[in-house]
Amino acid sequence: MDDENYLHSACQLSQNIRDRAAECESLRRLPDATFESYQRSGLLRALQPRQWGGFELSPLTFFAAVTEVAAACPSSAWFLSVVGIHNWQLGLFPEQAQRDVWGKDTSVLISSSYAPTGKVERVDGGFRLSGRWSFSSGCDHCQWVFLGGVAPSDGPIPDMRTFLLPRSDYQIIDNWHVAGLAGTGSKDIVVEGAFIPEHRTHRFVDAYTFQNPGQAVNTAPLFRLPFGCLFAFVIAVPAIGAARGALDSYRSYMQAKVAAYDGSKVADDPFAQRRLSEAAVEITAAENELKNTWTTMCAQAAAGETIPLSARA
């Protein structure tokens, strides 16, 4: 699928997602109909390696789709953004880990919780993991999970890693009762002494130095983009889309609203117009910053250049 058709699919789905927004918040997870539409349309495959059925599209295309969905339902967009980026990160893991997850079904998904709140022990052939992790968005619809942890190390730098576990190795605790983004289903994950082989781990230092094992098989410029930057923007983009959706809703509401004291149209009120214009400018500025940042980074990656730390910061 190319960029144009991918964005067209996101726009087509957004109205039905809007209609299910209240249901999404009430369920405290993504509605099955929305999940099935994501899978059927391929929206979650934007950044997935091509060898595993992905599209390897530009991050800007993925961000644009997330923004479109966020204007309709922020929780649904959060799921798309956060779970969708995990398909990209798995492409940075050793090839065997990718085969473990996608070998039989390339539509299998991964949730996550990166804060290193559990215990990691080094054992023969890998690690043993136990503990509790919070905020694993979309975990109800995922068959694997990424969990953050610090592996025992003799070096001066903590060996922070992402550990990949199958659904059989963890429990989901249904404790997601919140006021906002309730539909993300960001529940707790509990692990009791699960073994994780070495190849199902991804070192943060490898991501920092662009020495990810998966780059040996996933050679597209997409997989030479900085891990920290891509994840930071994935978290921010749903907020930009939600702001755009709120602005559109406010504009529609104000066009029909009449002031109670004199019957004048609120849309003609200069104070309301000023607030509207200020919000519009701030949202547009955020969208432009997004575009400028990733146009530059993608061009550098495509040219085979190393993206400098100053730009990443």
Image: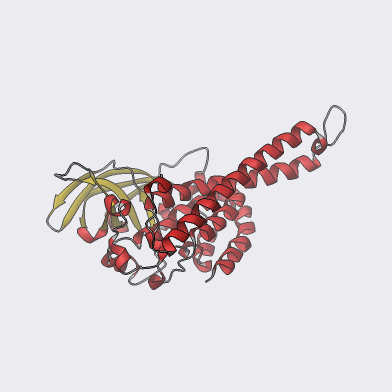
167 vs 240: above or below: below
Of 210 and 38, which appears nearest the observer?
210
Q: Residue at image x 44%, y 68%?
A: 54
Of 59 and 142, which appears nearest the observer?
59
Relative side of 221 to 282, left or right: left
Image quarter of the C terminus: top left
Q: Is residue 185 visible?
A: no
Q: Residue at image x 48%, y 54%?
A: 81
Q: Residue at image x 27%, y 50%?
A: 205
Of 251 and 273, which appears nearest the observer?
273
Instruction: Locate residue 214, reporting x and y percent.
Output: 31, 64
Instruction: Locate residue 36, reporting x and y percent.
Output: 51, 63
Of 71 and 215, which appears nearest the observer?
215
Instruction: Locate residue 210, reporting x and y percent.
Output: 32, 56
Q: Residue at image x 29%, y 43%?
A: 116
Instruction: Locate residue 103, reporting x and y percent.
Output: 32, 71
Relative side of 260 to 175, left or right: right
Q: How many marks?
A: 0
